[in-house]
Image (cartoon, rainbow, N blue to C red):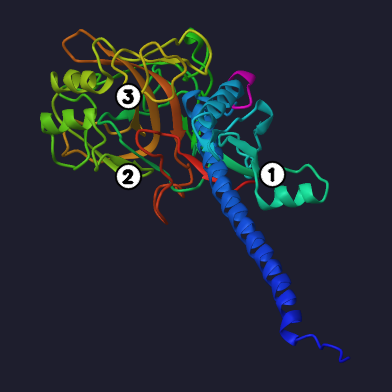
Amino acid sequence: MKNKRQHPRASQRGSTLVLAAAALLMLLGMAGFAIDALTLYVSRTDAQRAADAAALAGAKIFVSSSCTTAANCTTGSTQTLVKQAAEGAGAQNKVFGQYASIADSDITFPPSPTGDLHDPMVQVKVHRVIPTLFIGALSRMLGGNVSGITVAATATAEAFNPTGSNLPFGTGCIKPWLMPNCDGNQKNPANPACPGQAYLIQNGQIANPTWWNNGAGGAIGEPWTLHGNVLPSQYNDISFTGSNSSGNVYRNEIETCAPEAALACGSPVYLITGNKVGPTKQGVNNLIGGPNGQDTVNWNSPPPFPITAGGNNPYYPPGTTNITQSTSLVTVPIYDGNGVCSGNSCAQQSVIGFMQLFIDQTSSGAKDIVDAHIVNIAACSASGNGNGNGGPPVTGGGATLIPVRLVRNP
């Protein structure tokens, strides 16, 4: 009896089935890996976005708290507010479908690489375990219990006050009022250009950067007035075009961030004639939502000063405290205090710094005097290297005097 020989195709059928099964497993594994990789990539992007938003929100507190001017941003009260702002921003950003949860321990305050206390930094870490398909299944096959991979992102933001720096600096959304370098509420260091008054800025530094404390301290929180009469027909109102003194243009530049209302250290400014009674009050009330409904601040305690939203605040419900956005926060330029004359035909003045003010209200008198308080001061470099020459100036966005920016993680 003959032995039957096995047909070669029979053995090939079995091996083909094994190869097909192996190929299918490989395809499934590659698909699972691709899905996991895409999931992790998207989640990592979400985490970075949440970390960036949280760091920027925290750094904004440095600005509203005035600590960059006083160079004391390490105080516990300020850092508590920074952490609250950062955690609040995290709670509004999702990572893989869930809001980022940022704890106090995820927020640190690294020192500035330059060692300048005027430039505080906050660092925020966001991390979350992301469930994975391929890696989780592989772990269970091997007897593990890993169900996902932790994605993490870190962001560092800085509030940059140019005081003490030689970097070119400027700011936008300037309001059309020019401040002399004279502090009428202080006596020292005495400014010869302002008899009986002190410097606001001296040799590129802030002369009195501490809390006003009802007259017992420095300039921060000090009551201030805008649109005050300096000379006959001269109210220290300015024109950004060098020639236009129209009341309508002036009022519009109070109410809005006019494109031309941007200045850098060393920029020329031009005074305009007339006291602009009417346009001043109209512009200010339209800006801050007054005479009723504007935001308010309690100036009787040391900074950070808590800003409370009024009925006309466009960003927050009325009564919300510790807000960081207010139309009452404005920026004005400071000049050296010499050679004030009436009209735009006089010698131009030069910007030596900037002041951030909180407008409280317009007075009821005939001059349309604007009542305000000092929140921040930024000084231009005394050496002249920060005067806007030699490169675009570092600027803040919108009405922010002190720029807040993301920086490379230290």
Q: CA distance from mark 2 to mark 1?
A: 56 Å
Q: Position of residue 108 (x, y in %)?
A: 66, 33
Span colored in magenta: 73-77
Q: Which residue is most to the bottom?
A: 2
Please report contact status of discs 3 and 2: CB closer than 8 Å, yes or no. no
Q: Quadrant of residue 281?
A: top left
Q: Amino acid at mark 1?
A: Gly
Q: Amino acid at mark 3?
A: Thr
Mark 1 residue element: strand
Look at the picture and state if 380 lies above or below 37: above
Q: Please give the label number shown on residue 267.
A: 2
Q: Position of residue 225 (x, y in %)?
A: 31, 17
Magenta segment: does it hold 244?
A: no
**Lower position in the chain sequence, tag 1 or tag 3:** 1
**Callout 1 crowding tier (Cα within 10 Å): few <14, some 14–19, many ≥20:** some
**Lower position in the chain sequence, tag 2 or tag 1:** 1
Can residue 199 be seen by looking at this rendering?
no
Magenta segment: does it hold 76?
A: yes
- In depth, the one of 146 and 226 nearer the eye is 146
Residue underneath mark 3 = 327
Q: CA distance from mark 3 to mark 2?
A: 25 Å
